[in-house]
Image (cartoon, rainbow, N blue to C red):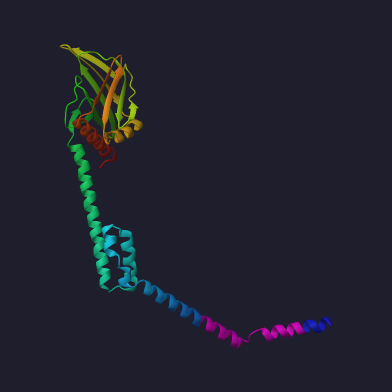
């Protein structure tokens, strides 16, 4: 009985196995189906890349200067509709955006370079250091001012902050502060290395001249764009005042020039 069952199973499998002719026909049918599917996919892509539909939002893309989206549309048109008028329009818009962006970059670069050229420049041939000062005022020691200036020696570029007081009475300040819109930062200094004082004709003056580290630099960037900018010198007595418009402009210009000099453009 077991032999009879096994034989029946073999016969059933043989009966279910397609002949060589049937196998070839199945392969041909699969090929036809595959070709038909590719044709449908191609037609769908062709439909999706219809020039009118692809270019329905060109004006907004140009307004937004979305050159990546425009370039994608251009590539589809090149593939499916290389002779269409829409392709010429898209290429024209891409070129216009590139031209606009290049002009804007050139204008920004020229503006940045002007920040350096407008500063007062003084070269010390003994130390081989070029000093850059703001163009609006000369920061003498016997004045009530706050300013920044730049030093450059070959590829080394650094920034310094100067804060000074002038009056009839000493304030003997031990602490210095800069503040904008309620944000205050203490300006640390070595009273033996960074602070000096003098007097003449009934007037006295005290000042500090300190290097600007990265933390202070980033504070000054925010400080220069504040609405209410103040400086305070405090010790035995305290002197607080608002910075003038010239001081603020000077700080902004020196910070910009410092960035340009550091980046080389």
Q: How many badges with numbers are in the image?
A: 0
Estimate the x, y position of residue 121 in percent, counting from the top left. Answer: 18, 31
Residue closest to the eye, 221 or 192? 221
Residue 28 is inside the magenta segment? yes
Magenta-tinted stretch: 8-31
Towards the viewer: 259 or 244: 244
SS assignment for the magenta stretch, majority: helix
Residue drawn at (22%, 42%) of the image: 112
Residue nearest the viewer, comparing 246 with 158: 246
Does residue 98 appear to the left or right of 12 in the view shown? left
Q: Which quadrant holds the N terminus?
A: bottom right
Q: Residue furthest left?
A: 201
The quarter of the image holding the C terminus is top left
Q: Quadrant of residue 80?
A: bottom left
Q: Choose top left, top right, bottom left or bottom right for residue 184.
A: top left
Residue 82, percent across and down? 30, 72
Looking at this rendering, what residue extends furthest in the bottom direction?
21
Where residue 202 appears, as percent x and y from the top left, is: 17, 11
Taking the spot 56% from the left edge, 86% from the top edge, the residue there is 25
Q: Position of residue 170 (x, y in %)?
A: 24, 13
- Position of 111 relative to 235 (above/below): below
Foreground pick, 234 / 214: 234
- Measured along the vertical axis of the image, is residue 245 above or below residue 196? below
Q: Is residue 262 magenta?
A: no
Residue at horizontal 26 percent and vertical 39 percent from the top: 260
């Amino acid at each position: 009985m077991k032999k009879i069952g096994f034989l029946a199973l073999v016969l059933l499998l043989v009966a279910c196995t397609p002949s060589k002719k049937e196998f070839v026909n199945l392969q041909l049918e699969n090929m036809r189906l595959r070709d038909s599917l590719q044709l449908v996919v191609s037609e769908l892509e062709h439909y999706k890349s219809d020039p009118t539909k692809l270019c329905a939002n060109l004006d907004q893309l140009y307004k937004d200067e979305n050159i990546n989206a425009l370039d994608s549309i251009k590539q589809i048109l090149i593939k499916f509709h290389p002779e269409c008028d829409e392709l010429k329009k898209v290429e024209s818009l891409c070129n216009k955006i590139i031209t606009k962006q290049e002009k804007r970059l050139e204008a920004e670069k020229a503006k940045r370079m002007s920040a350096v050229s407008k500063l007062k420049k003084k070269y010390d041939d003994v130390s081989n250091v070029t000093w850059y000062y703001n163009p609006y005022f000369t920061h003498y020691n016997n004045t009530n001012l706050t300013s920044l200036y730049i030093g450059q020696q070959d590829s080394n570029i650094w920034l310094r902050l100067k804060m000074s007081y002038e009056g009839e009475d000493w304030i003997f300040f031990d602490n210095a502060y800069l503040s904008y819109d309620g944000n205050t930062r203490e300006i640390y200094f070595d009273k033996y290395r960074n602070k000096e004082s003098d007097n003449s004709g009934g007037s006295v003056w005290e000042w500090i001249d300190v290097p600007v580290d990265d933390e202070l630099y980033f504070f000054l960037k925010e400080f220069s764009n504040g609405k209410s900018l103040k400086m305070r010198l405090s010790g035995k007595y305290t002197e607080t005042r608002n910075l003038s418009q010239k001081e603020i402009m000077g700080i902004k210009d020196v910070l910009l020039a410092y960035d340009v000099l550091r980046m080389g453009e």
